[in-house]
Amino acid sequence: MELSRKKNFAILRKLYPFITAIFTGLIGYTGIFLYAKYQGRAFSTQTNYMAISHIDEIMASIYTIATTTLHLTDTDCKTTRPLLMAIVKNNPEIKSIDLIKNKQFFCSSDNQFVAKQYFNNLDRIPKVSYILFNQVFDMPYPNNNKENNAVIMVIDDQEIKHILEPRLDTQLVTLKLDNTNITYQGVTPYTKNYYTVKTPSLGQTPYIIETSYISPPTIGVLLFYYGKHFFIVTLLTIICYFFTRWVIKNISGSYYELHMAIRDEKIKAYIQPLFRAEDYQIIGVEVLSRWHDSNSTIIMPDTFIPLAEKTGLIIPMTQLIMKEVATTLAPYAKKLPDNFHIGFNISCFHCKDLEFINDCRRFFKHLRTNKATLVIEVTERELIEVNETTKLLFKELHTLNAKIALDDFGIGNSNLSYLYDFSIDYLKIDKSFVSRIGSDALSKNILDSIIEIAHNCKLESFAEGIETEEQANYLREKGVRFLQGYLLGKPMPINEFIKTKHFQQLITSSL
């Protein structure tokens, strides 16, 4: 089952970058598509109003000219024609004007009646008509006394074509007059497969301007008009792919593997004994951790503890280690000497709430004795915020008869206020100072100062990293109470520790 789970996870790890990239691309390209539709509609609406403003101007001019020229039927054609010619000359949108008087063609601006070919019966001719693209259209005009008189104007097709010319290649601007559709190409059938924005005329003459654009936009259209946007989305898609791949390889994968190791209890408790400096008598242990991976390789804490602290997995890891230590030592709990030290390292994550108090209570419950002294080692490598929660946490720990040790003193976020705010009981001297005994005068002076701080604050002092007799003798002479290091005892699995002569002598001497 474990092999199958790992195989499935490996497949998912390979697929996640592709899924992320595809998802990013879909969102980006869909956004471009919707933006193109929105822009097309907005641009078409703007085009409508531009076309309407020009056509309304022409229609208003026609209406004004009709009102003026209808009265010219009261004069003779010889007098009227020069006036008609002047009107046409000053209004380039009009090609010619024909006047009808008493249901007969009366006068024309160009010496010939252009409208004759369009009207076979003048009995029901509208008061005002205009001819556009060889189509006859009526213009609403109030009745007057001269029912048998009319005016017919021929509109310049090129003027209308210019107004209806698309602003983009993907547009089609249509003038709808009655049931006739007119584009810049002339009279055309109704065009489908276009998204159309309709706008009615603003003036007296009823008509509709429809500006249409290709919908849905084709890939070619999108690339032509939104090529930069496509490039950006494609670049983001590639970045998402490689970034997700990097995260899975460097962070997510490690997090998952560590999470599974904790769940499968592959993080094992290791024990390093603590000795009294004066007689090398074992007085307790510090609990460390090692990761036993599936390849029987032991991974050292420097590799996975930073990840555990960064991701918050340090909390379930500590709970796992505390349970293993408690259940392993439980059969020997009554044989342990009073105040036997059992030390655990905690991080700033444990100090964010009071849940760690419950972890400590469960530890004593599994251990089945309260004789042991639980030593909580606070590292200076991570700054713990001093607030009401942390103060209450350490107060409750002391209520459980736990002791607080300040670990790695002098090498991290040194905060002497810890000594007061957290009621520190032990000060642990880091091995980096111990290792320089006899070789570095500056480090020796710093070491002496740390020991003096511990004595002046009435704190018990620990020294770790003891590897030589010279170091042990120097620290003992300086009054350091407890020693820990490879010289006295190396870290080992807890199941092996309980078989050592040190532990066997310990439980035997306590009887």
Image: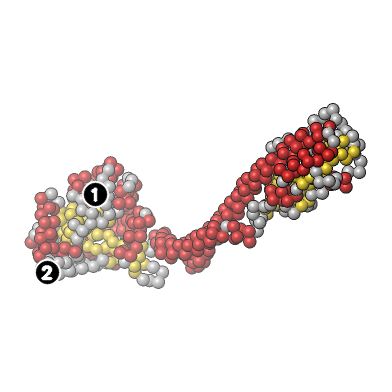
Side (left or right) of 61 relative to 151: left
The quadrant of the rendering that contains the C terminus is bottom left
Residue 65 visible in the current orientation: yes
Residue 505 visible in the current orientation: no
Residue at mark 1: 402
Toward the viewer: 159 or 434? Answer: 159
Side (left or right) of 437 relative to 15: left
Furthest-front residue in this view: 78
- Alpha carbon distance from label 1 to label 2: 37 Å
Type of amino acid under label 2: Ser
Q: Residue at x 41, y 64 (%)?
A: 250
Toward the viewer: 322 or 159? Answer: 159
Q: Position of residue 345 (x, y in %)?
A: 27, 56
Q: Label 1: state its secondary structure.
A: loop
The part of the image, by quadrant, that contains residue 151 is: top right
Q: How is the image coloured?
A: secondary structure
Type of amino acid under label 1: Ala
The part of the image, by quadrant, that contains residue 440 is: bottom left
Q: Residue at x 81, y 38 (%)?
A: 80
Q: Label 2: state its secondary structure.
A: loop
Q: Residue at x 32, y 45 (%)?
A: 354
Say few, some or many: other residues with alpha carbon within 10 Å of mark 1 (under 14 / 14 to 19 / 20 or more): many
Q: Position of residue 326 (x, y in %)?
A: 31, 56
Q: Nearer the viewer, mark 1 or mark 2?
A: 2
Residue at mark 2: 439
Depicted 495 relative to depicted 461: above or below = below
Depicted 20 relative to depicted 404: above or below = below
Toward the viewer: 442 or 204? Answer: 204
